[in-house]
Amino acid sequence: MGLGDGRLFARFGMRACVAVLLAAATAGSVRAENLSDVLVRTYQSNPLLNAERAKLRATDESVPQALSAYRPQVTAGLSAGLIAVRNLLPGGDRESATLKPWQIGLQVNQTLFNGMKTSNTVRQAEAQVKSGRESLRNVEQSVMLDAVTAYMTVMGNQSLVEAQRLNVTFLRETLSTTRRRYDAGDVTPTDVAQSEARLSRGTADLNAAEVNLAVSQATYQQVTGAPPGRLTAAEPIDRLLPRTREDALASARRANPAVLGATYDTDAAQLAISIAEAALYPTLGVQGNVFRSSQTDTTLGTTRSDQASVVGTLNVPVYDGGMAASQVRQAKETLAQTRAMLDRVRSQGDTAVVAAWVTHEGAKISLAAAESEVKAANLALSGVQKEALAGQRTTLDVLNSQQDLMTARARLINAQRDRVVASYTLLAAVGGLDHGRLALKTPSYEPDAHYHQVRDAWGGLRTPSGQ
């Protein structure tokens, strides 16, 4: 390697500095965006999260539907018509008339006892609402983790593209210098071919990095609701993480929304047995009627009739063909299935925590190793350049050293991304990745608000937002 290559490295260093300054100037015109800002926007506008909120609001309505069985059922009726009457009287006389009958009535039914079916149905609906809230929290965690992953992926891919561009610039300058030296007879065609091959590889790597960046930007917009701007560096969320793996497992068993949701599902399945058993009990009710009819007597003896009644009814099931017994057995088997699913969800939760814990610990080690590797690769490249200037190294040695440094930088970028994502993944596994725990500056969506708006509603078609 001659003096010309020494000038090449100097020019490349200057180009790299200029590229960094230009990138900074360009980024300055774009609004800076940090991870908290992105998570706030995701929490407020993510379609999947909003759909789950609407689903929970629909589930809330199961409680007033169950409570309606405690309330009276009122029915009003009205009928009117036209009747032509011809009656044959004793002695052969006849009488004819055209009647305009009408009837109006009001009926009130009130169930007094139905084998505790209503109370158990209300409790089941409340358990389903609680399960729905945990499902919403689980979706929120999943969406938040997707947003963090998309954010860090875009950041990492942007860094990789910039690194690959600088690498291509270096390789292009290397090829230009090598060709000049070949024309001067200082190197062989092999050196030129080696430089051309490395430039082609660098160009392909740059293209692949740009493709990955475009894909990650599209994913980012899908998850967060807006294209990425100038993203600022994000830090791991270690301050919110458990200190030991045992603490992580204990936290997950207490707070993991999938586990809690499965627990409430088991409660609902248990209550389903009592609801099915209610069909075996007698039912007691009372019915009140108020009734008025006019011109309905075809004998023409009465022009109007008013009636009022209160009737108590008691129905005792004797035999229904085995339907109720079958439904009870079915509910018991469903409970057994739900309990088995709860055990499975708990096991899956423990596995997810262990996997997230070891991944997080491994990410720390990988990041430290990648930082050491980049530092060593920088020193190695500097040494090879100096040796090349002294004629002790070849162009291929410099190219190999540059490739080693590029590989180390890519590994460091990926390690930095994985370090942040792993910390948020562990927080999600223990059930703590929500807007409240992250202290996001956004109004909270409170499921209780909508629930209390509709729980005791006796009527109305308006759908409250719950905000």
Image (cartoon, grey):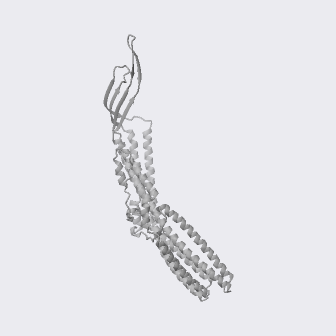
Residue ranking furthest to the front: 29
The N terminus: image quadrant? bottom right
Visible residue check, residue 42: yes
Does residue 308 lie above or below 28 as drawn?
above
In this rendering, is residue 2 above or below 356? below
Q: From what the image shows, is residue 251 above or below residue 94?
A: below
Q: Nearer the viewer, residue 253 or 429?
A: 429
Q: Position of residue 452 (x, y in %)?
A: 34, 51
Q: Position of residue 329 (x, y in %)?
A: 44, 44
Front-most of residues 58 and 22? 22
Residue 278, given in percent of the width and then of the height, sits at 38, 41
- Left or right of residue 3, residue 122 in this image: left
Q: Toward the viewer: 182 or 397?
A: 182
Q: Which residue is nearer to you in this view: 124 or 161?
A: 161
Kindly identify the residue that appears in the image at 58 percent across and 76 percent down: 168
Image location (x, y in percent) of residue 400: 60, 79
Q: Is residue 263 visible?
A: no
